[in-house]
Structures are given as structure tokens and as C-alpha cells.
Amino acid sequence: MTSEEFRNLNRQEASAYSLLLQALWQDVHSDWQSAHELAQDIETPDGAWVHAYLHRKEGDEFNATYWYRRADRPVSTATLEDEWGSIVTELLQKQPAILSGGVG
């Protein structure tokens, strides 16, 4: 699945994916608050990356920098849309095959 295909899922389809992917789906569908609520309690490097992206999108560079550091990633200089796509692509690769439409 591509990031564009993921973007085009409906809410029910998106709910089959990890909480971080659900957060990114919420974000791209104009619900930053719900996205942040999902991502903020996931204490993994990927969770920190999504959290960093969300704070960067919000315009909170201080918090974004902190969360990029927690994710062990450089502060992104990509467009927000490109960073969203990169995160989704990487997380989709980690998604269990049965949920992402692949063969288990």
C-alpha cells in the first residue's frame, strides 16, 4: 500500500492499522487534536517521530525538536506533506501483513 492509498482509506478501514498510522490518518483528515491524542502516549522511537511531526505541523518548533531528538532523527526540513508520506511509508512497512492487505 502506498501513502496515497492509505490517505484515501475511510475511517473504518484506517482503524485496522496501528495507532500511529491511525494518528497520521486523523491528521491528514484535518483532525490534528485526535492525531496528537493518539500519538502522545506511544513511547517508542516511531511514536516520538509522529509526535515530532505533529508539533512541527502545529508550529511548535521547540517541542518538535525535543521529539525528533527522542526519535533519534534529525529535525525534518522536508515539506510537511513529504514528511507525512515518509512516516506513513515507513510505518506501513512495519505493519503486520495481514492488516495491510498482504498474505500472512
Image: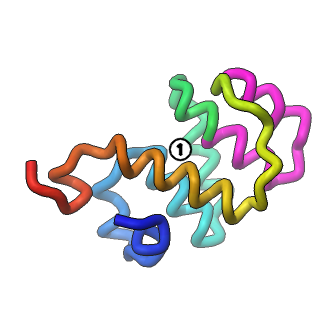
Which residue sits at x=68%, y=22%? 70
* Residue drawn at the location 41% of the way across and 73% of the way down: 5
Query: Would residue 63 be counted in the magenta stretch?
Result: yes
Please give the name of the residue rendered at 38% of the width and 76% of the height, measured from the top-left corner: 10
**Quadrant in which the N terminus appears:** bottom left
Q: Is residue 85 left or right of residue 101?
A: right
Left or right relative to 58: residue 27 = left
Q: Position of residue 92 (x, y in %)?
A: 38, 51
Is 39 situated above or below 25?
A: above
Q: Observer-nearest residue: 15 or 74?
A: 74
Instruction: Identify which residue, 28 or 86, lies in the foreground.
Output: 86
Q: Residue placed at 71% from the left, 48% from the top? A: 54
Q: How many marks?
A: 1
Q: Residues in magenta?
A: 50-70
Chief secondary structure of the magenta portion? helix
Picture coordinates of residue 103, whole percent (x, y): 10, 55
Residue to which mark 1 is pinned: 38
Which color mode does the image show? rainbow
Residue 28 vs residue 7: left or right? right
Membership of 69 in magenta stretch = yes
Which of 12 and 93 lies nearest the eye of the viewer? 93
CA neighbours of label 1 inside 10 A, class few (<14), some (14 to 19), many (20+): many
Judged from the image, the secondary structure of the residue bearing numbered disc 1 is helix
Q: Amino acid at mark 1?
A: Leu
Position of residue 78 measured from the top left corner of the image (x, y, whole percent) = 77, 54
Q: Position of residue 61 (x, y in %)?
A: 89, 40
The quadrant holding residue 80 is bottom right
